[in-house]
Image (cartoon, rainbow, N blue to C red):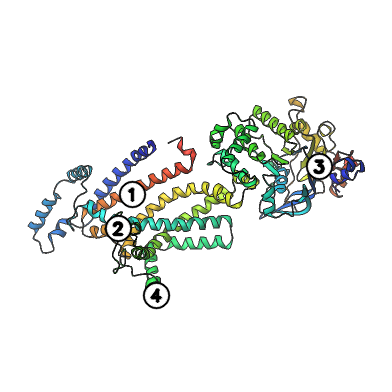
Amino acid sequence: MKLILKRLLLALPNLVGVIVVTFVLTRALPGDPAAYFAGAAATPEAVAQVRTQLGLDRPMFEQFLSYVSDLAKGDWGVSLATGQSVISELKGRLPASLELTLFGLVLAVSVAVPLGVLAATRPNSAWDHGVRALTTAGVSLPTFFTGLLLVYVFYYKLGWAPSPSGRIDAFVSSPPTVTGFYIIDSLIAGDFTALWASIKQLILPAGTLALFVLAPLARMTRASMLGVLSSDFIRTARASGLTPMTVLYTYALRNALLPVLTTLGMVFSFLLGSNVLVEKVFAWPGIGSFAIESLVASDYAPVQGFVLSMALLYVLLNLLIDLAYTWLDPRIALEG
Amino acid sequence: MSPETIVHADPRAAANVPPPLLAVDGLSLEFRTRSGVVRALEDVSLSLQKGELLGVVGESGSGKSVFAYAMLGISDAAAKITRGTAVFDGMDLLGATERELREIRGREVSMIFQSPRTSLNPIRKVGHQIEDVLRRHAAVRGQDLRERAIDCLKRVRIPDPARRYEAYPFELSGGMCQRILIALALACQPSLLIADEPTTGLDVTTQAAIMDLIVELAHERQMATLLITHDLAMAAQYCDRIAVMHAGHVVEVGPAQVVLHQPQHPYTARLIASTPHTADSIAAMQPIPGSLPDLRAAKLPPCRYSARCEYRTERCDTEALPVVPIDATHSVRCWRAAA
Ligand SMILES: Nc1ncnc2c1ncn2[C@@H]1O[C@H](COP(=O)(O)OP(=O)(O)OP(=O)(O)O)[C@@H](O)[C@H]1O
Ligand SMILES: [Mg+2]
């Protein structure tokens, strides 16, 4: 408990930094929201009126102070484009993004870790080289390209995947919202048609994300596993006649996962970044595509809200990773 | 050709000596590495009776650990055994499959290592690590497992074993970790223990305590022990017999006190003169001249000590090394003794 509090306090300066930087960046962007929302035919007087209404004519510092005090009150502002509060807009879209990102992450981990172990236990074998080739291909292609390629092959050419148009087939009704995660909600509702339909939609975009982060995870697993396998305690375990399974999993892998966990935190930030493009390619109704639309419209509040919620997610996931770390590694607990 | 075959060829010895627990004959092992072939062991013959303590002594790099790992079948992947046999309790160790070896490791033959702290899994409770071995080899399950593990800790004289059971290695001292490793090695009552420099890295008082413990347990259980060390004086203090290794050769084998007081091989004599316990004063201590030959050399002389030896003659570098029996239990590989 103390550890959690400590971590959250440590994250505070980062969050403050994020707030300041996004505020400054959005103001520095070209484009005038007042002109945009007053409409193309508006007279200069009308634009000035909109500007006063939005408070954009006040000094930058004053705008910042009122933004921060609103934030403190839990008010993230209003989207000019939709007229809805930013919080409710994000809340409605966040589950879609989270489901996609987490599914991608789980997919990546469940492929990368076994591949890394396979490569480490057979160094310089065909497996090892194969894994290296696969992971290199994964990072060297930009995500939107991988996404388009997957769509082209699996939807357009082979017809195995459904059309890249959102979270669920147009002819299947989405499950009643409980968590906002379609997979979980359809399980709760016992609606297997919806479950299958939403998994089908998820596979390609999540696969695109997974391919992108497969490389760092598999490489880290391989390197860390190789290191652990040559350590003294593995020799002890082998000299005690323990079975290869016990040596590999109970002894080697658990130790090797510690650095992989750290990589996971880093990889998650890659995922949040590439999410934006992947959502665009797959017409995914998440916060990423919302952020792009808002950015194009110079709609500040949602963009700031988007970046802030990403930062919060990142802090949260790293907290979870720290907790997993203390759970896995007894040596950490003392310092916490 | 080896010292041991000669010893057992003696009819008197053969009559009253039961078959050895471990008999290694003419073992040669090399590492095939990118920088060449390292001939780490050549024609090594050693035997060990039930309950006997044999000290294997030699400088760093003389092949002691390589020999120990070969016995357990846990050598590096680059290691190739090119000649020889090793029979443990009727079982051919060198011809056994990995599966067969796994059955005897930790149950019949156990090993403890130097650097006890890193030899334990850092993120697993020591009690659980002992349980892993028990679960693997003994038919113990459930709650009994915990009791047996605590019992193992008790038998290596660990105070408050129930509390130690819950400890992680980083919470324990080096000496305590070595006791845990001993408990782990002895959990299944092996008949052979290989202790590879078990006291290196421990402070002097702990060293003595650990050695006393190993020897005491070995006697208590009639357990044969191969004590690997570079300290000849310590080996002589604890062991029945001593084998001296140099650059992958066993150069001298004999009863501990005989080897210590009447060394036959020039290297043994040098080794004794270089150890602080046996030299009369620090001033009398003499380092061994020269260094081990490069075991990767294409043409190693028959006697690998010749380049460092003050008694070197021409035949040392040309004729195959003889095994010279001094008496029924003591033999040496040196032309000088043959003269
Ligand atoms: N995996 C390996 N590949 C190549 N050469 C090796 C390997 N392992 C050991 N050797 C070589 O075998 C020789 C014997 O090494 P070994 O570790 O048995 O020495 P040692 O007598 O145990 O020394 P120490 O007292 O330092 O433990 C050394 O020359 C070493 O370089
Ligand atoms: Mg060694």
What residue does disc 4 label?
Answer: A157
- How busy is the neighbourhood of tag 4: few (under 14 within 10 Å), some, or many (20 plus)? few
Q: Nearer the N terminus, badge 1 or badge 4?
A: 4
What residue does disc 3 label?
Answer: B251
What residue does disc 2 label?
Answer: A288
Q: Is disc 1 placed on a helix, strand or loop?
A: helix
Q: Amino acid under label 2?
A: Gly
Pointer 1 residue Cβ closer than 8 Å to ligand 1: no
The CA span between labels 3 and 1 is: 68 Å
Indicate the chain on which mark 2 is placed: A
Residue B108's place in the image compared with A147, above or below, is above
- How busy is the neighbourhood of tag 3: few (under 14 within 10 Å), some, or many (20 plus)? many
Q: Residue at x 68, y 49 (%)?
A: B103
Q: Is disc 3 placed on a helix, strand or loop?
A: strand
Q: Which quadrant is home to the N terminus of chain A? A: top left
Q: Is disc 4 placed on a helix, strand or loop?
A: helix
Q: Is disc 2 placed on a helix, strand or loop?
A: helix
A214 relative to B326 in the view: left or right: left
A271 relative to B163 in the view: left or right: left
Q: Amino acid under label 3?
A: Val
The CA span between labels 2 and 4 is: 28 Å
Q: Residue at x 37, y 71 (%)?
A: A155
Q: Are marks 3 and 2 in contact (CB under 8 Å)?
A: no
Q: Nearer the N terminus, badge 2 or badge 4?
A: 4
What residue does disc 1 label?
Answer: A313
Q: Amino acid under label 1?
A: Leu
Q: Quadrant of residue B193?
A: top right
